[in-house]
Amino acid sequence: ITQAAKELPADVVKREKLFTLAEIARSGDSQKAFEAYYEGIHDNRLLQHNVEAAEACFKAFDDGEIFLYHAARGFRKTTTFIVTLASWLIGLYPEKTSLITGANEANAQNITKSIAQIIENHPVFHMTFPHVVIDKDKGWGADGYWVRDDRVSREEWTRNQAKIIDPSFVGGGYKSSIINGRHPSLLLGVDDLHDIDSSSSVTEREAIKSVFMTQILKTVLRENDRLMTRVVMTGVPFA
């Protein structure tokens, strides 16, 4: 088999590899599946420090706890554990909803745009989740991005989702009115809740912490004191 593979054109071998990764990626909600998806999307494996972080991430999910990842810039924290993770989870659970937030509006919306670009345009996403399609009739932009499961008719999907008023995913700064009243059932992604400006002010840090703890974190789903919504927080540890 190995010799035969060597004789095949490189593009055929690569496509077969992508099919294998896609099959693993959609096999379930596991670290192995996520790592396969990441490799397919980015054409490289998780960096070793992020393999270790992924172990902690999936353990936190299993335990119903927050996954907190503070590391220096350049560790691909946001790309790995918010952008890529969110697009994979949305593919697995298109019926659920996600919220992306952080210190400012621009950063949160840039992250959601990156998620949207993968879902709309990346061939490996389409290969992995061919049934997950964007729903531009509902909305596909800064006010919220909607997807649907194309394996069921639009009528059945609409009926099944009738009680869901939140978009599939949306992003906004922690003060943004666009995130008010949202109840993410799939993922709450928090990137740089404290930025370089707020980190220098004790008063500002405490104000942000108060909003997050009393307003944003209260919106996620819990069961018997366990988080049912996955919560990921990434950031830089300011001195």
Image (tube, helix red, strand yellow):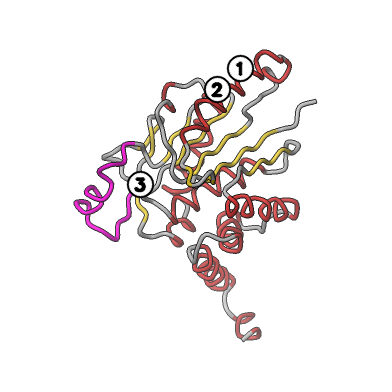
Nearer the observer, 125 or 160 = 160
Q: Residues within 10 Å of mark 1 (few under 14, many from 20)?
A: few
Helix, strand or loop at label 3? It is: strand
CA–CA distance between discs 3 and 1? 34 Å
Q: Which residue is mark 3?
A: 147
- Kind of residue sitting beneath label 2: Val
Under circle 2, the secondary element is helix
Say which label, 2 or 3, has the lower sequence index. 3
Circle nearer the viewer, 2 or 3: 2
The residue at the point 23 percent across, 47 percent down is 158
Residue 11 vs residue 170: left or right?
A: right
The percent position of residue 62, horizontal first and vertical second, equals 58, 55
Which residue in the protein does label 2 denote? 211
Mark 3 and mark 1 in contact? Answer it, CB < 8 Å. no
* Residue ID at (42%, 57%): 126
Where is residue 201 shown, x and y percent of the image?
Answer: 71, 14
Which stretch is magenta?
147-165
Q: Earlier in the sequence, mark 3 or mark 1?
A: 3
Residue placed most toward the observer, 102 or 228? 228
Residue 133 locus on image (x, y percent) = 35, 51
Q: Quadrant of the C terminus?
A: top right
As drawn, the residue found furthest toward the front would be: 224
Q: Would residue 164 be counted in the magenta stretch?
A: yes
C-alpha distance separating marks 2 and 3: 29 Å
Look at mark 1 in the image and give the residue it sits on.
207
Callout 2–callout 3 Cβ contact below 8 Å? no
